[in-house]
Amino acid sequence: MRLDIAPHRLRWGGPKERVTQTCSVIGCGVAFTCDDVPLRMWKDDGSAIALCDVCVDRYVVSDQAGTKRVHGKEAKRGDQG
Ligand SMILES: [Zn+2]
């Protein structure tokens, strides 16, 4: 599994920070409820991101599934604006 998104569009939290309660994709900012985070990822240095459902659909590419690629332009619009 990997992310199909430009690195500068992600806001990584520092190793000492709590995992963010909002989506880490810059320009998204969907807030999560409690611990219901659709996806979390960590780097080796301990910094972390969290993604909302919409961004998971848009940017996560599953290598196991072969060629599942999701293009953002026609992705569904969230209710959050
Ligand atoms: Zn998002």
Image (cartoon, helix red, strand yellow):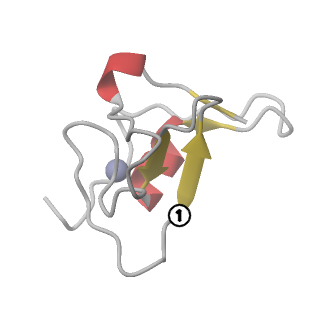
Indicate left or right for 73 with 1 as reference: left
Report the residue that reaches farthest toward the front: 16
Tell me residue 79's x, y (percent): 21, 68
Which residue in the protein does label 1 denote?
38
Q: Residue at x 24, y 47 (%)?
A: 28
Report the residue that reaches farthest toward the bottom: 34
| Above or below, comparing residue 69 to residue 23 in the picture | above
Q: Amino acid at mark 1?
A: Pro
Tell me residue 56's x, y (percent): 51, 49
| Above or below, comparing residue 31 to residue 57 in the picture | below
Q: Which is nearer the eye, 17 or 75?
A: 17
Tell me residue 67's x, y (percent): 76, 28
Q: Quadrant of the C terminus?
A: bottom left
| Above or below, comparing residue 80 to residue 48 in the picture | below
Report the residue that reaches farthest toward the left: 81
Label 1 near ligand 1 (CB < 8 Å): no
Q: Quadrant of the N terminus?
A: top right
Task: Tell me where residue 32 sits by quadrant.
Answer: bottom left
Local secondary structure at mark 1:
loop
| Above or below, comparing residue 78 to residue 24 in the picture | below
* Figure disc tally: 1
Task: Tell me where residue 12 sits by quadrant.
Answer: top left
Tell me residue 5's x, y (percent): 45, 24
Q: Residue at x 40, y 58 (%)?
A: 18
Mark 1 surroundings within 10 Å by alpha-carbon count, few (fewer than 14), some (14 through 19), many (20 or more) = some
Q: Residue at x 56, y 38 (%)?
A: 46
